[in-house]
Image (cartoon, helix red, strand yellow):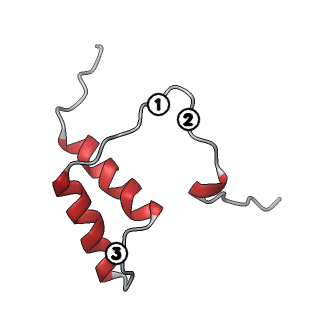
Amino acid sequence: MATTKKVPWDKPAPKKSRPTKLTSKSKAGAKAAATRAGRPYPSLVDNMNAAKKQRASRSPRKSKS
């Protein structure tokens, strides 16, 4: 049984998640990633990676144990 992986633009947004507002630093990082890949502007994947890094750089989650 072959599994097919859906690309981000074919998946619906998660219901309970809030969008991450990119900071100017994150936008610059997405733009740099696009430039390294030879694109003139950031794609959805560049922006998703920038948002992921931005969320990770915030205070770490506290464990409930």
- The three-letter amino acid code for the residue at tag 2 is Pro
Q: Is residue 8 toward the left or the right of residue 20 in the image?
A: right
Residue extending furthest bottom?
Answer: 38
- Residue 11 x %, y %: 64, 49
The residue carrying mark 1 is: 17
Q: How many labels does the image show?
A: 3
Disc 2 to disc 3, C-alpha distance: 25 Å
Which residue is drawn at the image coordinates 66% and 55% (left, top)?
A: 10
Residue placed at 46% from the left, 30% from the top? 17
> Circle 2 sits on which residue?
14
Note whether 14 is above or below 23 in the view shown.
Answer: above
Q: Which residue has dot 3 on it?
A: 34
Mark 3 is surrounded, within 10 Å at the Cα level, by few (under 14), some (14 to 19) or many (20 or more) other residues, namely some
Which kind of residue does numbered mark 1 sit on?
Answer: Ser
Proximity of marks 1 and 3: CB atoms separated by less than 8 Å: no
* Marks 1 and 2 close (CB-CB < 8 Å): yes
